[in-house]
Structures are given as C-alpha cells and as structure tokens.
Image (tube, rainbow, N blue to C red):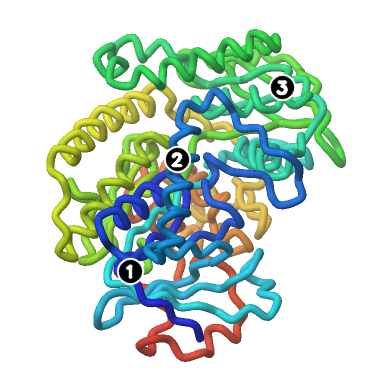
Amino acid sequence: MNTPKVDVAVVGAGPAGLAAALAAADSGAMVALIDAGIRPGGQYWRSPAPGAGRFTPDTLHHSWRRFVDTNKRLDDLAGQQKVQRLAEHHVWSVERIDDGWAIHCLVGPEPRQQAGRPPVTIQARRLILATGAYDRQLPFPGWDLPGVMTAGGAQALLKGHLVVAGKTAVVAGTGPFLLPVAVGLARHGARVRGVIEANAPFGFARSPRVLLGALNKVGEASAYAAQLARHRVAVRHRHVVTRAEGTDRLTGVVVARLGRDGRPEAHTQRYVECDLLAVGWGFTPQLDLHLQIGCATRVDVDSSLVVTVDDSQQTTVDGVWAAGESTGIGGADLASVEGEIAGRSAAASLGVTPASARLSRLLRRRAALRRFAGVMHRVYPVPPAALDNLPDGTLVCRCEEVTAGAIRHTIGDLGASDPRTVKLLARPGMGWCQGRVCGFATVCLTARHLRRSPTVEDLRAFAQRPIATPIPLGQLAMPSTEGNAGGDGG
C-alpha cells in the first residue's frame, strides 16, 4: 500500500482547504491536499468534468480571481515538491498513529469503482479537515417525484456537467444560495418561473454595522438581483412550496404565502407549472471524519451541528484543525479566511512562527464575516412550523421508505423520546444515504413532536458514521496502520 508521509494533511480542496494548504506550505510545511473531486474548487468553485465542455466562470463571484491565483500558487508549490495534490482520493477513515494521523483513502472517480488503483494511506503529523457541507432538505408532499432536486444538485449539474436539469424551473426554500442557482439556470436557457423564498431580507436593516463589515456580500446579492430582473424572474418573499404535483414526473408545484404564524395560508395557494423544482433550506456540515476521531460539537444559530474550534481553528482533538462550513455555515469568504488561519496555525505547531501582523488582519476579517453569517442565519431561518402539517403519508426517509406517520407513531405509540430511538424503531437514516438527506428533517420532526428544540445529541445521532464513504467489504478486512481501521470513536 502506498503511504506518503507529510507534515500537514488537508482533507478537502474547496475554499477552506485550498487556503489552508497554501498557508501551511507557504509557512514551510510539507503538505498533502486530499480531495475526492477530479479538479479542485469544491462545490463553490466547481469546474466541469473532463469532456463536458468549456467552463465559463460566474463573473458575479468576486472571489473567482482568488481561486485562480491560489490554484496557480499551489501548482507552483507542487512543482517544487512542497505540496502533493491528491485528486480522486476518497477518505473513508482517519485514525491516530504514534506520530500523528493516518488518512485512509480509496482512489478513483468513484470509491466503489477503483479500476484497479490500490488504496492509499497518507500519514501526517497534523490534520486539517475542510470537508464542506451538503444541501439541507425538508420533506413535503411530492418531493420524491423525478424533477424535484436539491438546489445544490441543480447547480452541480449545471456547473459540473453543463446540464440544465429542466426547461421550466422553480427555485424554492430559503437563503442567499437560491439567487445564484436561479441566475445560473436562467443564464443557460431555463425559464425560471420564480424564486420562492420563505423569508424576507429586511432583517438585515437591523444590523447596519454588520453589513458594513461585509459590503462585498451586499454587492454580490445586488448583482444577482439585477441578473434576475434582467431575466424577468420574480422573487416571492414569505412564500413556500407546499406540494409538488405529477404522476411519473414533476408537472407543477403549489405555492402559498406564509402567515404571521409561519404556516401557509390556504387561501393564497396557486399552481405554478414547471418540470424542475430546485429546493434548498441551507446546508448541513459534513462531519463524518470529525466525529470519527472525537471532535467536540455544538448547535449553531441555524440549528446545524458544527465542530467546536478555538481562535486558531484547532478542534478539541490534539493535532486536528477544522475550517470552513464544518465550523459553521458562512460562505466561501469566511471559509477561505478560516482555512488560512488553520494552515498557519498547524504549521506553527510544527515550529514555524507566522507573521503576527497578517494574522491579526485575518482574525479581524474572520470576526466580521462570522457576525455577518450569524445575522444571515437569523434572517433566513427554517420556518419553525415547516413540518407541523406534514401529512402522515409523506416520505421522510426515501431510502427506507419511512413516512412522517411512522415517525410520529414511534413517538406517540412506542414511546421514543429522542431521534436515535426513532432511528432504531422506524429505520430512518439507515439506508443508502445514511441519513444525509433525511437526518435533519427526522431530528426536527421528532423534536417538534416532543415540544423541544434539537440538541447536540439529537443531531449527532444522524451525523455520526463509522465509515465516511462507501467502501468494498474487502477493504475492512485489510490490516490498518495500527490495527484500528475504523478510527477512534468509530
């Protein structure tokens, strides 16, 4: 088995991981940048797959130039043997070894199809986890119809394969991410019937100082609004999609206005014809590896489970740093700043002294962006009553075909008092996706039925997985670096 040895291993090549790898390498550390993708950039700076066509970057992303510059500098460092860029490396487990960490990877386009390429274990003295996040979903009648997909899924098809997922689209949910999704679909030929936003942006007016610290965010939102106006796409605030309709595919959605109590008003319902619904309720941090090795977690403002870090982005596990969405959903700018802080700190722990003037500027910038992220989550929350009137027959876990009624039955009739027990009794989260799609909804539905807020333990019940990506059973039979292939806490 191939076993590269480096000073710092960075898992994830999105905004946080790229910044962390560059900062650590610039400080003099030998770095391995590990990512499952064919090309760097993560979801935010996703490039088309080979053969998909010419890539046209979204010029509204003010940070695109930073990505290009960072990528070029990392290429230069790779040429100097200071950085190993390990693409198509799927990390399935991390474990502690005597002198640091062992990162176990399957290699290839898909972890289940290695095409004869042997597995790789990277040994590193320090570890930085920048694993990003994935779409957060809430179930509603018809959400399992073909043509209904996550906002991130529609964006990934567009940016990664230059495929427009439908001719007539509705973009719905909440949060600023809906805007670039709608703009991207409209720019590439889809007729976008509207952006259905559950909240309104007026709450930002109560925090003018926070906005001053993130003026580029305001400018980016204004640019997207101008693009939507140019394509004649209306944004309907305080509205939600109550159901998707169709038989073997999506044919339209029913939209209603939210009342003051956060519930849809029946008399405002109207039907919108479409063959694509891109829906998203924010993002869920990807914490598989963090939880494997025992990192402490907390519940963030948006009810996400996130990793606890100190001022230097170090987790509660010695020798491990975290940056980006795993420490709190805040966007690419914040992720990049956190990544640079983490990379500098990890290198400094090996004896390199960072320049304090640059570090102080980074800390100030991080504080401003974190304040903006906090306000953003308060302005764009998931409506508290979003799951209150969910019909019993609505699928919550599509892998195991668990309905909302089955979940309520485990609580009301079988006495389940927490999501973990619901999972054991009704099997939501035990299918192919391992709770990545249904986990948050199951936690919220359970907590709401029990008349309490979700806790850290509730969220960990669906976030903790002993294996981070699908692997062949034969891989589990292979001896690990220290005889513990499952990793600490797995």
How far apart are labels 2 and 1 at the CA level? 33 Å
Q: x, y percentage for residue 64? A: 50, 33
Q: In this figure, which residue is indicated by the disc labeled 1?
A: 293
Q: x, y percentage for residue 21? A: 37, 55
Q: Is residue 418 left or right of residue 43?
A: left
**Quarter of the figure with residue 255:** top right
Q: In this figure, which residue is indicated by the disc labeled 2?
A: 69
Instruction: Work out which residue is located at the far right of the displayed protein and give it.
Output: 248
Residue type indicated by callout 3: Ala
Q: Residue at x 77, y 24 (%)?
A: 190
How far apart are labels 3 and 1 at the CA level? 43 Å
Residue type indicated by callout 2: Asp
Q: Is residue 414 left or right of residue 392?
A: left
Can residue 38 be seen? Answer: yes
Q: Residues within 10 Å of mark 2 (few under 14, many from 20)?
A: few
Q: Residues within 10 Å of mark 1 (few under 14, many from 20)?
A: many
**Mark 3 or 1, nearer chain start:** 3
Q: Is residue 477 left or right of residue 418?
A: right
Q: Is residue 137 above or below residue 223?
A: below
Residue placed most toward the observer, 297 or 57 = 57
Q: Which of labels 3 and 1 is toward the front?
A: 3
Disc 3 is placed on an element classified as helix
Residue type indicated by callout 1: Ile
Q: Residues within 10 Å of mark 3 (few under 14, many from 20)?
A: many
